[in-house]
Amino acid sequence: MGQRQTTIAPLESPQVDLPVKTLKFENNSTYTGQVNEKNQKHGHGKLIVPGKLEYIGQFQNGDMHGFGKMIHTNGTEYEGEYKHNRWDGHGKLKYPNWQIYRGEFQDGLRHGHGVLYNSDGTARRSGQWKYGEASHCCGLC
């Protein structure tokens, strides 16, 4: 995964009474984890999409849903809540340039209160975000 190699460790214990399987898909991605009665990703598992991303966390009826961590081959990392394969809820997004956003997400975008930090850890922008863009800042803009 690029020059920075990161290993994702398990996040939490899996749901009991769900079988664990390895599924392979047409796009060469592999899922290892719990499945439901329809053989869908469901519960705790790890998804690897070669040349694109690695995700470990919760799934629901085939979707990344619940808490998880994703590392993209471009260096982007996200750890937080997912809803139907999108960042949704509270999370931390680290960009390839080492800037970090901590805050709320909706439908895959920064949305709600959040703080964008510079690579040195100083706050760059704090306030409300709307559909990925800063909409109201609290003195750091």
Image (cartoon, helix red, strand yellow):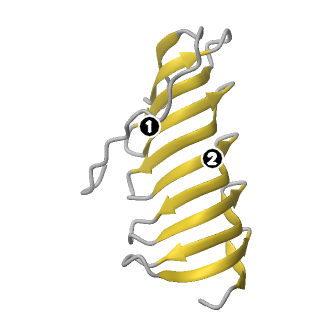
Q: Is residue 2 above or below residue 37?
A: below
- Residue assigned mark 2: 81
> Which residue does the image show at 72% across and 54% down from the upper left?
107
Q: Looking at the picture, how far across and down is residue 84, in whole percent?
A: 70, 39
The residue type indicated by label 2 comes to Glu
> Which residue does the image show at 68% across and 12% down from the upper left?
38
Q: Is residue 12 above or below residue 54?
A: above
- Residue assigned mark 1: 49
Q: Is residue 106 above or below residue 128?
A: above
Nearest to viewer (mark 2 / mark 1): 2
Give the structural element (helix, strand or loop) at label 2.
strand
Q: Looking at the picture, how far across and down is residue 44, in whole percent?
A: 54, 26
**Left of 75 or right of it: where is 27?**
right
Residue sticking out furthest to the left: 3
Q: Quadrant of the C terminus?
A: bottom right
Q: Is residue 93 above or below residue 28?
A: below
Give the structural element (helix, strand or loop) at label 1.
strand
| Mark 1 closeness class: few <14, some 14–19, many ≥20 residues within 10 Å | some
Q: Are marks 2 and 1 in contact (CB under 8 Å)?
A: no
Return the residue nearer the eye: 110 or 40.
110
**Left of 10 or right of it: where is 103?**
right
Return the residue nearer the eye: 127 or 73.
127
Give the total of numbered labels.
2
> Which residue does the image show at 39% across and 70% down from the upper left?
98
The residue type indicated by label 1 comes to Val
Return the residue nearer the eye: 28 or 16.
16
Point out the tag, 2 or 1, that comes first from the N-terminus.
Answer: 1
Q: Looking at the picture, how far across and down is residue 28, in whole percent?
A: 43, 29
Q: Looking at the picture, how far across and down is residue 24, in whole percent?
A: 46, 20
